[in-house]
Amino acid sequence: MHKEKIYAYICILLISLLPAVANAKDKTTGEENLIADNAALFGGVAVSADFVGFSMKLLDSKFANMEVAGRLNFLEKYFPIVELGIGDCTKTGSENDNTLSVTSPYFRVGMDYNFNRKMNGNRLFGGVRYGYSSYNYDFHIDELRDIYYGTIETLDLNDLNGKNQWLELVVGVETKLWSIVRLGWSLRYKYKIKQKASEYGAPWFVPGFGKNGTTTFGGTVNLTFDIGKSARKSMK
Amino acid sequence: MVLSIAALIGCDEIDCTLYNTVFMRSTFYSDGSQISLTDTLTVGTGREARILLNRMTGASDLTLPLSHWQEVDTLVLTVSGENYLVEDTLWITKTNTPYFESPDCPTNVFHYITSVNSTHTFIDSVSILEPHVNYAQGENLRIHLYSAD
C-alpha cells in the first residue's frame, strides 16, 4: 500500500508539471495557428499506452488495469477512441486470508473533444467512454465459521462469471514532447450502469472499472505516438 | 486540485455491509393476531442439543440462526411454566448459499427456505412469508399457535 501511495504522489507531481511544460513550449513556438484555419478533416491515427496500470503491476499492487488505446483525429477536435486492456487483481483480506482473484480483458469506446482552439501541440480534452468487461473470478474463503452449529469450512468458489457495463466522463491534457511522442493524463469519473454477478457475490474489483461500486474515480498517464497528417504537419 | 487527487488515490477504505448478520425471523400468531408468549421459551437444535435461545419470556418475535450447511435444521421449542413443560419441533428444509462482498468483509451463508414441518403440541401451523434468509431480516416464518380456549 505504501508503494502505491508513493507512486501515486510521484505521478501527481509529474503530471501537474505538464501544463507548465506546455506553456513553456507555447512561448518558444511564438506564432500560433488556429485549428479552424489549419486542421485537416482526417488528422491521423494515434496509439498509446497507460503508464499507471503497467507501473502498478510492476510495483506488485493488489490491482492494475493495463491498457493500450487507438484513436483517430478529425479536424483536430474530435477523437474517437478505443481502449483495450486487461484488469488484474489479487486481494487478500486485511484481517483474514480470504482472497479474490480476477484477471480478464475489458474495452472502452468513446470520443474526446479537444477544447484547445490553437494548433500549438497541446490538447485539452473532455470526453465520454462506454466500458464493458466480461470476467471470471475466484474467491477463496479461508475459514467460514458457523459459531452456532460449530462448523468450520474452507471454500473455493472458482470460475464465477460477471459482466459489467459502465460510463466514464473524462477530462485530460496532452502535450507534444518530441516529434510524434506525446505525454498526457486523464481523470475519469466512472458510473456503473449494469452489473451481472454470481449469486455468491460480486467481485471487489471489476476489470477496467476499478473498485466495484456505483461510482469510482480513475486516471491514466498516457504515452502517445501521434502518427498521421497532423503529426507530420506539427513536425515541420 | 492536486491535493484532492492525492486524497482520492491515497484512500484505502473498507466498505462492508453494516448489518451483516443472517438470522431467520419468526413471529407468533394466535387467532389471527400477533401475540407474546407469557411462558418461558427455550429453543435448541435437537440432536446436537445446542441452545440457541435460553429461557426467554414474553417472546413475540424470534431471530434464530440457521446452520450453514445442513439441508434440514431441527429446532426444538420448549415452553415451560410453573408446573408444566411442552415441546414442539420444527424441521426447516432449506438451501444454503455462501455470500461474500470483499476479502476484507465477513463471509456469510444465505438460505432459501423450501418447506417447514412441525409437531403439533401447541403449534397449529407454520407459514413461510419470506423464504430468503439474508441480511434483509424480513419476517420469514409465522408460527400459528393453538388458541388458549
Image: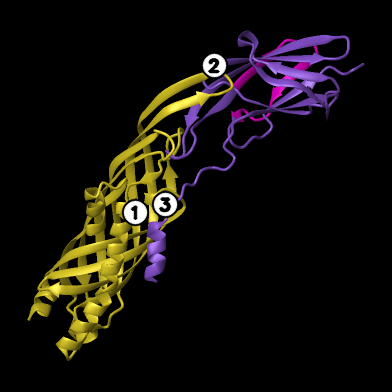
Chain colours: A yellow, B purple
Tell me the CA gap for discs 2 and 3. Answer: 39 Å
> Which quadrant of the figure has residue B115?
top right
Give the magenta-colored segment's residue range: B114-132
Chain at numbered mark 2: B
Disc 1 element: strand
**Contact between labelled residues 1 and 3, with CB atoms less than 8 Å apart:** no
Foreground of the two, A154 or A97: A97
Q: In the image, what residue type sits under mark 1? A: Gly
Q: Position of residue A234 (x, y in %)?
A: 12, 79
* Residue nearer the viewer, A3 or A180: A3
The label number, if any, that marks residue B12 in the structure image? 3
Q: Secondary structure at mark 2?
A: loop
Q: In the rendered image, is residue A77 in sight?
A: no
Q: Is residue B2 above or below residue A233?
A: above
The x, y position of residue B136, in whole percent, is 61, 37
Q: Which residue is mark 1?
A: A131
